[in-house]
Amino acid sequence: MYLEEISHTAGVTLVLCVFAVLLLALHGRRREPGCSLPPGPTPWPLVGNLFQMGEEIHLSLTNLRVQYGDVIQIKMGSLVVVVLSGYSTIKEALVRQGQAFAGRPDFFTFSAVANGTSMTFSEKYGEAWVLHKKICRNALKTFSQAESRDSNASCLLEECICAEAVDMVEALKKQGDERYAHDDKEFLTIVNTNNEVLRLFAAGNLADIFPIFRYLPSPSLRKLLQYIDRMNNFMERNITEHLITFDRNCIRDITDALIAMCEDRQEDKETAVLSNSQIIHSVVDIFGAGFDTVITGLQWSLLYLIKFPDIQAKILQEIESQVGVNRLPQFKDKPNMPYTEAFIYEVFRHASYMPFTIPHCTTDNVTLNGYFIPKDTCVFINQYQVNHDMDIWGDAEAFRPERFITLSGHLNKKLTEKVMIFGIGIRRCLGDSFARLEMFVFLTTLLHQLHIENVPGQELDLSSTFSLTMKPRPFQIKISTRN
Ligand code: HEM
Ligand SMILES: *[C@@H]1O[C@H](CO)[C@@H](O)[C@H](O)[C@H]1NC(C)=O
Ligand SMILES: *[C@@H]1O[C@H](CO)[C@@H](O)[C@H](O)[C@H]1NC(C)=O
Ligand SMILES: *[C@@H]1O[C@H](CO)[C@@H](O)[C@H](O)[C@H]1NC(C)=O
Ligand SMILES: *[C@@H]1O[C@H](CO)[C@@H](O)[C@H](O)[C@H]1NC(C)=O
């Protein structure tokens, strides 16, 4: 009885204490009345929440959403990061409040790219940036509308992409002779160089999280800076070469399109904010962003194609009925092949190999879902969570291209819109339609020419290694010629 009473009082005291602490904690986080900072796990001194995140940050952050909601705040070392999940919350931020979320954080590694003038990584959001992005978009458009030299292709872009696809198939065929092709050598050599950058980027990020690492000797950071330097030099040489051989009537590639822009610019006073070198450096942006991402998408596609032979068979059926055997696939086939398009969307969704967009940064004080986010806060967008949200997809873990096909057999645009891999809003990827066209032509050309299947006995693992872009684990494919 006596004991019971004590424990009762103790219980009440404890509850009161906890309540008081909670109130204090809440009070401490309050900035303005009725507008608190986003919730999140309690950070440890010095390291913040870094060790609570584990190996696969996108999964940990997706789990945290269950507890804390769509807007959460974590600390990575000394860096405060607000993480956004949920389709409608992300849309509210990046589209409706687009300008406020359109910045890029002032990361040490970011500012090294393109000598600090990169459109993608290191420009303050503002008039000059808006213009820069417009110029890049126009250059891509100019290039994709340039006329083809080959009467069979509708444009230069189609000619380039189709030729590349054929080259890839030839390279694969040659390797197929060695019975088991180890992935694709040509792919691998390309990817390895780019992989190196991504790996170094991941390592260099320590310098973004803990500023002290900028001043300590770090081999990987030094290597990253060296690499970026080499890349910049290479581009500079290449661009000079382009300038010498430039012919306004024969646009060969994106560099040429950008040079044409610079020349047009002389008359246009509006664009005087940007230097020529800044515009030309866009080549680095466009190549850097477009190369590795498409190749990774193809690697994932190959993995899904051999993992699910019945899905491969359905795509093949579409190729046979829409393209036939007498010619190769072209751009114009894409609208007639909804299943193949659905497959590509499902690869984007299921693999979510860009789990986050490039980090954003607030350009102003903002309120989102009732939470206050101060100016210059680093913001992560959890694309992986949207792509695996049970409320949107139901059986999110199943790989099922059919989910995108309507009863009448068309692509369900309302649903494909919700696949989040290119970001949305002002900072949305410039090359998304490019990328989807490229993947379409590569995949259909490959299947048109080759039969690919799993190597007997090989377990196909759909997990990935975490990075800025996630790669599938290495796997082998067995190749044989069709017909
Ligand atoms: C499947 C392939 C691709 C994927 C998954 C992809 C994904 C992305 C993502 C997630 C972003 C960041 C968006 C954000 O920060 O909110 C981005 C930005 C960008 N992408 Fe892509 N991309 C792909 C292909 C391409 C291609 C082919 C090009 C060029 C032809 C390209 C050019 C760019 C550029 C220039 C940016 C920077 C935009 C900005 O900072 O405003 N991308 N991409
Ligand atoms: C890089 O930027 C620095 C200072 O902003 C400038 O002095 C230098 O010439 C630039 N280098 C190149 C290759 O553009
Ligand atoms: C166009 O395609 C046909 C048939 O595929 C081929 O014989 C011809 O050489 C091609 N023309 C050019 C200019 O490549
Ligand atoms: C560099 O220039 C050469 C010759 O103009 C061209 O063949 C090559 O594709 C260029 N490389 C890049 C990455 O732009
Ligand atoms: C943003 O909010 C902070 C804290 O409420 C305030 O001190 C600062 O002046 C605000 N800045 C802008 C640009 O509104």
Image (tube, rainbow, N blue to C red):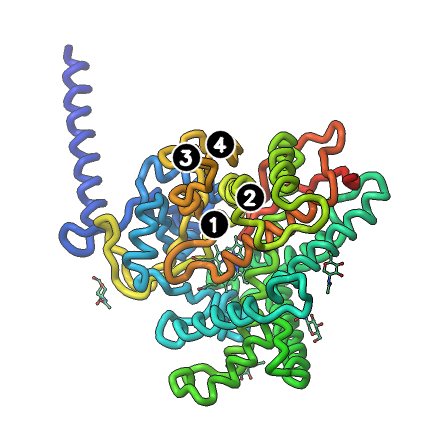
Residue occupied by mark 3:
393
List x then y, in percent, for residue 238. 67, 77
State the separation of the CA atoms marked 4 and 3.
9 Å
The mark that comes first in sequence, 4 or 2, is 2
State the separation of the CA atoms marked 2 and 1.
21 Å
State the separation of the CA atoms marked 3 and 2.
22 Å
Q: Nearer the viewer, residue 232 or 319?
A: 319
Q: Are marks 4 and 2 in contact (CB under 8 Å)?
A: no
> Badge 3, how many Cα within 10 Å: few under 14, some, many 20+?
some
Which quadrant would the N terminus be assigned to in this image? top left
Residue occupied by mark 2:
337
Label 4 secondary element: loop
Label 2 secondary element: loop
Label 3 secondary element: helix
- Under mark 1, the amino acid is Ile
Residue occupied by mark 1:
421
Q: Quadrant of residue 65?
A: top left
Q: Quadrant of residue 437?
A: bottom right
Q: Is mark 1 within 8 Å of ligand 1?
A: yes
Please state if 72 lies on the left or on the right of 442 as rendered.
left
Residue occupied by mark 4:
397
Compared to residue 37, the image places residue 8 above or below, namely: above
The mark that comes first in sequence, 1 or 4, is 4
Of marks 4 and 2, the one in the foreground? 2
